[in-house]
Image (cartoon, helix red, strand yellow):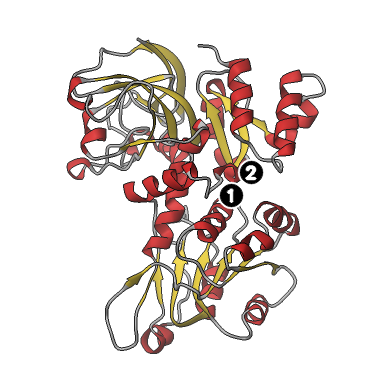
Amino acid sequence: MKTRAVRLYGKNDLRLEEFELPAHKEDEILARVVSDSLCMSSYKAAVQGGDHKRVPDNVAQNPVIIGHEFCGEIIEVGKKWADKFRPGQKFSIQPAMNYHGSLAAPGYSYSNIGGDSTYVIIPNEVMETGCLLKYEGDAFFCGSLAEPVSCVAGTFHAMYHTDPGRYDHHMGIKEGGAMAILAGVGPMGLAAIDYILHCNRRPSLLVVTDIAQDRLDRAGEILSAAEAQKQGVKLVYLNTRDMDAREALLSCNNGQNYDDVLVFAPVPALVELADSLLAKDGCLNFFSGPADPTFSAKFNFYNVHYLNTHVVGTSGGNTDDMQESLDMMAAGLLDPAILVTHVGGLNCVPETTLNLPNIPGGKKLIYTHIDMPLTAIADFEEKGKTDPLFAKLHEICKANNGLWCAEAEKVLLAAKQVD
């Protein structure tokens, strides 16, 4: 079967090509990819080429398909896996397989599987490691976004607290405690708010800060204080641009420090602010991975010693986190559409991937069976003045609080799908 895919040949060398897939083996699965969301990790792989830890050294001779946040449907199942999977099932994949300790992953390391393609062969190790995940939801894009959402689930699971005089770690946030998320209204910050309001372990107070009022206002529209109150959480959005941030945050908590503080931007001043806000046994979660390997900030070790404050960080979710995300999406508890700001076709992947740091907004969602320039949802209205499809998409998204949705996906695929 022929596939059309974006392949990496070396540093900054991405090519959209059509080629023949080999016949799948008895321990492999042939699948159709429908959607992929672009990730900064793909940008890093593209600019580093063979120097990237997950990209093979011989990538110039054996190019790999990029994209690791993808969702699709199974076409044919090899004999070995016929009792567990069937044609027609939707799927998502956890790329971090850790197969026999290897860093190899779909979207980085394989010639015949990656998210930015039309058809793929899923190798045996994906199933062996339990990383081929069934997805029961309606919209394919939700399955694509399960991987980034799992990063949020994982970071909350990594936090911990202890009882006085004991060394047992109680994993997760302090239930019913006070939580702050600093610089928390970017796409991943919104995903974190959505998750913590709808999972089974919640704070009683959640204060989310930023320095841009428009972003805070938009966050309040998407994830409102009224919705949070229904979940038993007092949600406060706080603009700290022109105030003493620490004093303002303490005021929101009746002058008290916080049990859990998350940092969503790699800024030393934010890390130090988070440290200063920690209560006894407080947990600082550094979520935002810096590009600078020498990134550092001051930390109060007097409080580490006497108040048992501590810091954690994660760089992704595991398979359990991803399955949890898929289950919560299927149950309607999470709306990953809050991450999406742009939509495009497979043809725009090379240029978009190599320019990701310079494109504002959140997730860039790709439908692999269509050709379409990368387009911001905010631009649908203007484009709709000359294109009836965009006019329809604008109408649908406007009715959905400006967010992408399953209905928009169906309309786009019906109008533009090439096979």
Q: Tell me if label 2 and label 1 are in contact, CB under 8 Å.
A: yes
User: Where is mark 2, residue-wise?
Assistant: 361
Kind of residue at badge 1: Pro
Q: Is residue 109 visible?
A: yes
The residue closer to the viewer here, 195 or 261, is 195
Residue to which mark 1 is pinned: 187
> Residue 34: percent from the left, percent from the top?
47, 25
Secondary element type, mark 1: helix
Task: Judge from the rendering whether residue 310 lies leftward or rightward of residue 29; answer left or right.
Answer: right
> Counting other residues with Cα less than 10 Å from the Cα at mark 1, is it few (<14), some (14-19), or many (20 or more)?
some
Horizontal arrangement in the rendering, residue 254 relative to residue 315 (left or right) = right
Judged left or right of residue 224, residue 308 is left
Residue at image coords 22%, 20%: 78
Residue 309 x/y as whole percent? 41, 80
- Give the quarter of the image for residue 407: top right
Which of the two discs, 2 and 1, labels the residue nearer the N terminus?
Answer: 1
Residue 19 found in image quarter: top left
Which residue appears farthest toward the right when viewing the image?
A: 385
